Each structure stands twice: as structure tokens, then as C-alpha cells.
Image (cartoon, helix red, strand yellow):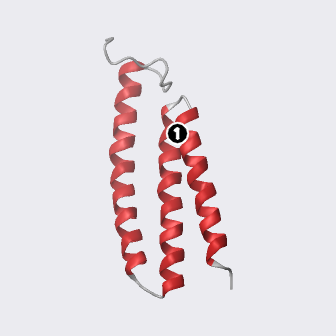
Amino acid sequence: MIPLSYYLILSGILFTLGVAGFIVKSDLISVFISIELMLNAVNLSLIAFSHYLRDMTGNLFVFFVMVVAAAEAAVGLAIIIAVVRNRQTLSLDEMDLMKH
């Protein structure tokens, strides 16, 4: 059996990579993927704690996080498509909401 600490370390590494990608990346798709990576890291830790404590509450929270992530993906991709159609770029550095 794999110890709980291994899952939590992996979850922490994934979350840190997601935060780093969110801060460092300059295109919209990479930022979007980084947010999804952070959500999956949280899901991994919730499932690990749920299995360790033999409680189904963590699984229920993961279900809700997945529902929110699916809604976020749909809305986020729609926003990305709208921005690309209007601005003709995915670069966050080149986007300025005051310009037309």
C-alpha cells in the first residue's frame, strides 16, 4: 500500500507546477491548463484523504470539483474563442481591454 504522504507530495508538486504555470506563462491556453492542473492536484489530495480515512466525503467533494471544472472549461473555452476572434492573439501580454 502506498503511504498517504506520497499522494500528498505528488499533489503538492502538481499544484506548485500549476501555480508556476499560471504566473509564468503568457498565453491564454497555458494559463487555462495550469488552472486545470491545480484543480486536479486538489482532487488527488481529496481522494487520497478519502481513501486514508475510509470516508466517502472526499469522493463527494471531488465530484463537485469535477462539475465546477467542467463548467469552468466550457465557459473558459467560450471566452478564449471570443477573445481570439476579437483580438487575433492568445498572448496575454498583447491583450489590452481598452483597445478596440
The image position of residue 11, as x and y in percent, is: 58, 62
Label 1 sits on residue: 22
Q: Depth check: 16 or 25 in front?
A: 16
Of all residues, the one furthest to the top in this rendering is: 99
Quarter of the image for the C terminus: give it: top left
Q: Nearer the viewer, residue 14 or 74?
A: 14
x, y percentage for residue 79? Answer: 34, 36
Q: Residue at x 47, y 80 (%)?
A: 50
Left or right, 29 with reference to 14: left
- The correct choice, above or below, for 13 with respect to 93 in the image is below
Vertical arrangement, residue 82 with respect to residue 74, above or below: above
Q: Residue at x 49, y 62 (%)?
A: 42
Q: Quadrant of residue 25?
A: top right
Q: Residue at x 33, y 18 (%)?
A: 97
Mark 1 lies on a secondary structure that is helix
Q: Quadrant of residue 10?
A: bottom right
Location of the N terminus (image quadrant): bottom right
